[in-house]
Amino acid sequence: MKPKVVLKSPREVALMRAAGGVVHRVLRELARLVRPGVTTAELDARADEVIRAAGATALFRGVQNRQARFPFPACICASVNEQVVHGIPGDRPLQAGDIVSVDCGVRLKGYCGDAAETFAVGPLAPEAERLLAVTRQALAIAVAEIRPGRRWSAVARRIQASVQQAGFGVVREFVGHGIGQEMHEPPNVPNYFERGLCEDFELVPGMTLAIEPMVTAGRPEVVLGDDTGWPVVTKDGSLAAHFEHTVAVTADGVAVLTNGE
Ligand code: MG
Ligand code: MG
């Protein structure tokens, strides 16, 4: 049996927008702070302050993962260069030319928001610049394609095509997800589609989804980066980028809940 997708009322979508607003504020604040010499632990500390000041709680801290040796210890994931997702904030200073993907999720008044953005640390090499542009664009394409009555597979194929036409890879092992009172709810929301391999679903008003393309500059395969079981890295060591928004399907299209509006 397919897991049941919980549709949200307009009141619940408004609560998710409030949570999404906190996530947006965190990412804007960190965008301002990212520069050579800053550590990802410093970014995490600032995110923690912004989340607490808003009366929200960080969703990632304490998350368990079957492969991991300990629960996730921070309030953001900060994934540098070849790290794709689940990077643990630490004391290594960011260097000019690095890219850092920051993923942030919060719960406010019982409802969740989840978003991610990859930031440039100082000027980037042209390939890294293009990777960020293509991944940001893949998320924009997905949002623009969402409307009620459409199958997710149609949207996923557009994401996949836009990334692969740029010569980059779409990560398959990690996908987007439904979101609401819980950070991870059904359905799975892949950034690619293969009949028989991916479950498809129809987009209907009241559905709330975290859409999150993860894109690699080289091959799309990923592996665990170390023995903690947390950071996920590209198998070939190539750079990876990650952009994410929480959205709601509406009667006539889509509303982005993590863009600060
Ligand atoms: Mg996220
Ligand atoms: Mg997510």
Image (cartoon, grey):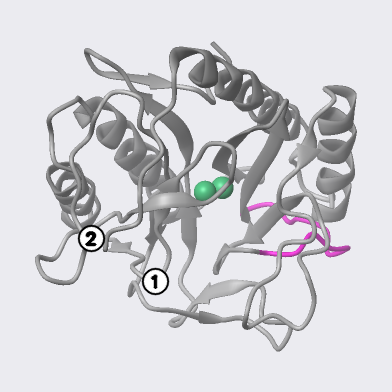
Of the two numbered discs 1 and 2 in the rendering, the one whose residue sits closer to the viewer = 1
Q: Where residue 178 sits in the image (x, y, percent)?
A: 43, 44
Nearer the N terminus, badge 1 or badge 2?
2
Q: In this figure, which residue is indicated by the disc labeled 1?
A: 173
Q: Residue at x 59, y 45 (%)?
A: 182
Residue placed most toward the observer, 137 or 254: 254
Residue at disc 2, secondary structure: loop
Q: Where residue 155 sits in the image (x, y, percent)?
A: 19, 41
Disc sitting over residue 253 in the figure: none
How many dots with numbers? 2
Residue placed most toward the observer, 62 or 40: 62
Q: Where residue 146 sits in the image (x, y, percent)?
A: 23, 29
Q: Which residues are magenta?
A: 87-97
Task: Specify whether 78 is left or right of 235.
Answer: right
Q: Report if the beta carbon of the residue with label 1 is closer than 8 angstroms to ligand 2.
A: no
Residue placed most toward the observer, 119 or 183: 183
Disc sitting over residue 167 in the figure: 2
